Image: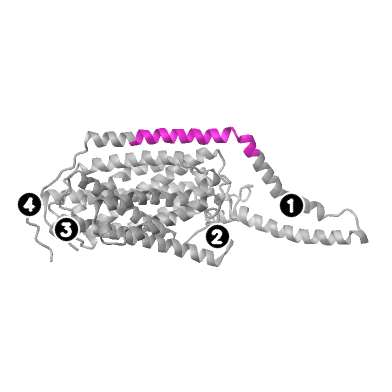
Amino acid sequence: MAAHHDTPLKIEQFTFSSGLKKTLLSIILIGAVVAVFGIWVAWNAEQHPHEEAHGSAHSSAIHDATPPAELVSTNHPEGEGHGALAETHAATEHKEHGEHEATKEHGDHAEHGAAAHGDAHHGPSWLTRIFANLLLNNVLFVGVSIFGVFFVALNYVANAGWAVGLKRIPESLGSFLPIGFLLMLLIIPGMSYLYHWSAEGISDPASPAYDAIIAGKSAYLNVPFFIVRLALIFGIWILFYTILRKLSIKEDKEGGLIPYQKSIRTSALFIICFAFTLMMASWDWLMSIDTHWFSTIYWVYTLSGVILSGFITVTFILLYLKGQGLMGHINNNHFHDLGKFIFGFSIFWAYIWLSQFLLIWYANMPEETLYYVPRFQGHYKLIFFLNLLINFFTPFLYLMTRESKRQANSLKVILFILIFGRWLDLYLMIMPGTVAEHNGFIMEVGFFLVYFGIFGWVVMQALTKMPLVPKNHPLLEESLQHHI
């Protein structure tokens, strides 16, 4: 049975120290330098071997185009006669084979589009990588940010008391949403590099670029409506974050049950809106990259990744604060619960991943396997299996024991691995459908460091705004006595 918390509760205030500011600023600057260097490397690699690459591509194009051209000549023999019977018969077989290949090629490229192969995104590949990196890191850190709001809301609706003591951390995560919105706007000029459906003339029957399948989706997948949905999604998220934050401040200053009850009602409404807006965001920002492909559980897959990333971040920040001598009211039992959530959602993520993959693999239909083919071959193949190893097998084996979830040093190791794992998962979701074989890691590491530094700065600044202990929360005592 848990003992009563007799020690007087210390109301702690986080200070954004100059040392931490210098560290985060250094990360941002190092990331910027690495990103610029990576951009230069990518640009330089594209400029100097241009002739060789062009020659290779041209040769490949001729090789692909030759069979149809040969078929045209062989299907119209100039002479007739008994001696041409075998030749005509061979030409007929060649024609049938050619029609089959042409149909297959048309299905792969015209119907399914080059979005899955990266060929439809006109422009230099290094520029495509820049926009792809902006999208990747926006999705990653905005997902962590909105998880903070969701986690606070979920605990209000569930009347959960165990997490009240660490409530300030997920609250602070939501402060990145306005910055995330501004950074997300940066992808709009490069939408044609990321989304095949935004290409000019793609929905115009009179255009050579016309794609019937994409044209059928054009009522939803068009640039103006995409921007409207983007603004709507962030508007809803920022609105609910602002309301819950104000109610939390009022609860902390005034006490009583009125702010708490209002928070429960607001949270219930937010959770409903969160489900629909995250679903829409996963369709718009991620799934529409591979325009011809869709999955009915894709948004659940995205949700599992968002929740897993969020719990990793909350635990990471909590460990940092404990290392600074703060959050004394948090004990190993809280870490145990956070570790269980990370363990559980890594399994849930793998379950959704496997469900989606196995159903498509077993059906073996071209319109379905289109998504996995570019991710399951070439240099993406290693990343494909590494993604599963890091995001499932590592936490499953590492966090299985009770003690592994209750020791700070043990958790730090797995958290660093899983932070990379979450980034790698999004890398595999975005890069094959945008940059295809022109991917890399130098520029990508730089962009991640810049975003990590900005995100850390905004969140640490938000932590200074309120005491780390929500002293007037009705369920605080339950959190202080939490033992399992």
Disc 3 to disc 4, C-alpha distance: 14 Å
Disc 4 to disc 2, C-alpha distance: 60 Å
> Residue 310's spot in the image, x, y percent?
32, 52
> Mark 4 sits on what residue?
8
User: Is mark 4 in CB contact (under 8 Å) with mark 2?
Assistant: no
Secondary structure beneath disc 3? helix
**Which of the two discs, 1 and 3, labels the residue nearer the N terminus?**
1
Q: Which mark is residue 67?
A: 1
What's the residue type where badge 1 is placed? Pro
What's the residue type where badge 4 is placed? Pro
**Which of the two discs, 3 and 2, labels the residue nearer the N terminus?**
2
**Which of the two discs, 3 and 4, labels the residue nearer the N terminus?**
4
User: Is mark 1 in CB contact (under 8 Å) with mark 4?
Assistant: no
> Residue 434's spot in the image, x, y percent?
51, 47
> Mark 3 sits on what residue?
479
Please tell me whether residue 420 is drawn above or below residue 405 in the rendered image. above
Secondary structure beneath disc 4? loop
Disc 1 to disc 4, C-alpha distance: 83 Å
Q: Which mark is residue 369?
A: 2
Secondary structure beneath disc 1? helix
Disc 1 to disc 3, C-alpha distance: 71 Å
Q: Which color scheme does this rendered protein use?
A: one colour
Disc 2 to disc 1, C-alpha distance: 25 Å
